[in-house]
Image (spheres, rainbow, N blue to C red):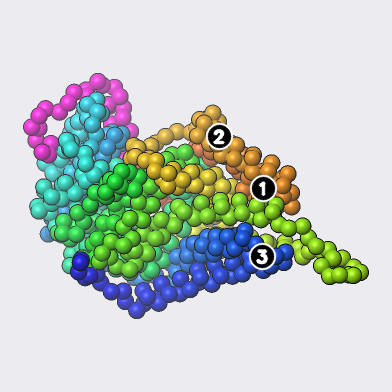
Amino acid sequence: MTRRSYIPSDAKTIWIRAIAIGFAAFAAIGASALIVEAGLQDGFQIWDALRFVLILLTTGWLAWGAALGLTGLLPRRKPAARAAGPSASATVVLVPICNEDPVATFARIAAMDRSIRQTGQTLDIVILSDTRAPEAQAAEQAAFRVLIAETRGADHIYYRNRKDNRGRKAGNVEDFIRTSGGAYDYAVTLDADSLMSGEALQRMIARMDADPKLGLLQTLPQITGARSFFGRAMQFASAFHGPVFTRGLERMQGATGPYWGHNAIIRVTAFAQSCGLPTLSGKPPFGGHILSHDYVEAALLARNGWRVEADSTIGGSYEEGPENIIAYAKRDRRWCQGNLQHMRLLLAPGLAGWSRYVFVQGIFAYLVSVFWAVFLVTTVAGTVLAPEPDYFPEAYQLFPVFPSDRSREIMALALGIIGLLILPKFAILGAAAARGRTQGFGGTGRAFLSVVIEILLTSALAPVMLAFQTKAVLQVLLRQDGGWPASARGEGALTLVEAARPSLWIVTTGLIALIATWHMAPDLMPWLLPVTVPMIAAPVLIAWSSRPVGRNHFQVPEERDIPPVVAAFREIHGRWRQQIDGTDAVAPMAAGATHVAA
């Protein structure tokens, strides 16, 4: 049996968890009581019992999310002191790639290297390629030559194309740790679209130096470079709400914190000792390589007694986000399969209780969409199949008894759910205005408008996303493997036809639901319109929200004062793009070239 050596939670963390769980339970029980009260008015049926369970689970989930945001509003801890100077610890920056745009990826590396040098550090940077197609490999090698020329023949930047692609990204990093990790104290893990300033890296390294038990430190990457309405709304939410929710997460998880697979630093010895990932028995989607490896690696580090923490106060950490809903849904499909795969790890020996709870949260994040869909179906079914009202329940009754109207309970339930969704965001807005943080978002008035529009947009898109997530869950449960498709980065606006092709089934489902409700339960029509109308309009919403918009929409601080590392990337990327597009120099790099890692 695996020995338990994880760090126990301190009293403060336990109290915060208890308050958050208690709040979620209170909200869930209150919502369920309204369902029971409404059901008792015309005879409690099996449909009412099912709705009771579903609303208990779904409202509890919403309340838990609200608790994270509200907990993050508590007075924050003092930011970690800035590093006094370069560290003596050997650190490597790992950039795993597979079928990415090499020009954009390597331009980010050039910008990061410039920023790192400006802070007086010298960090090795290793590009770990899993790209298989020969022409794509040749393009990467051509871009790498440009990178070496840009960095004036730097001897600390390496490129390796792995021959054995087992384990995908996690396997790529693990292979490097096994073969070359002994040369380093720390490794910074990035994605192809990650961008980090030299100062951020320096602060991360200083945090690791200061705490020998810190096995992993996760930063909060901010979305940058968004152009579409959808993308800019995500970028605003990431910058405005994200730090507060992440602070809540920090307080809730304590030393058993999160790992999101990128924009984080790991202690190499801790990772090597703890994070060898098993290959699960059976076929995908539940067997094979672990897709959502980051959650598992965080749990394994915690199991071996290492601290895993997040720090939202470290700035200079960036990534790109999807520009339209289709790209988001494709990425979400892989995350769905990875999270549901964690069902097989819930009883793994030796894990901290909170690590198991994190697995449950990740699983539930996708199952909740199915629960909401089933709740809507049972609501209609319960209304249709309800017994006819008995206006004269007593013999010789002179006056009829009319059934009670359940509108009061339904309205209270709807308002409660809406409150759980928007209350944390307006609370964050109020706190930001009081502390002057809204100035970076165009002032309090513009920040208020951005919050309102973001809420309206996410509300309109919620039924569409619910449909995509429900489909993803059903595919996984039906054993359909979604694989690991290449990430779509930098995709442009979608036409109405391009938006309709993957969402036509959502339109059909919405139409059928609306027509069936109209025929069988017309009284429910007003309550289902907010769900069915966005589904019917899905292609229009998807295409419209993918359109580019100006920077007046959803302003963020990084656009008023562009960070140097972001500005450097844009300058280098634009210059390289012109240089590479004007040549046909894509011949493979000579074997044994200086900077190609074995």
Tell me which amino acid carries mark 2. Leu
| Number of numbered callouts drawn | 3
Percent position of residue 450, x then y: 54, 52
Q: Residue at x 22, y 52 (%)?
A: 277
Percent position of residue 510, x then y: 61, 41
Q: Which residues are magenta?
A: 569-598
The mark closer to the camera, 3 or 1, is: 3
Q: Residue at x 55, y 60 (%)?
A: 54
Q: Which mark is residue 44?
A: 3
| As drawn, 585 above or below 56 | above
Tell me how far mark 3 sits from mark 2, CA to CA: 37 Å
Tell me which amino acid carries mark 1. Leu
Q: Which mark is residue 433?
A: none
Front residue of 223/377: it is: 377
Q: Which mark is residue 504?
A: 2
Q: The N terminus is located in which quarter?
A: bottom left
Indicate which disc, 3 or 1, sits on the residue closer to the N terminus: 3
Residue 338: say if magenta.
no
Front residue of 16/318: it is: 16
Residue 381 seen by the camera: yes
Q: Quadrant of residue 74?
A: bottom left
Mark 3 near mark 1, Cβ–Cβ under 8 Å? no
Indicate which disc, 1 or 2, sits on the residue closer to the N terminus: 2
As drawn, is 142 to the left or to the right of 317? Answer: left
Tell me how far mark 1 sits from mark 2, CA to CA: 18 Å
Tell me how far mark 3 sits from mark 1, CA to CA: 26 Å
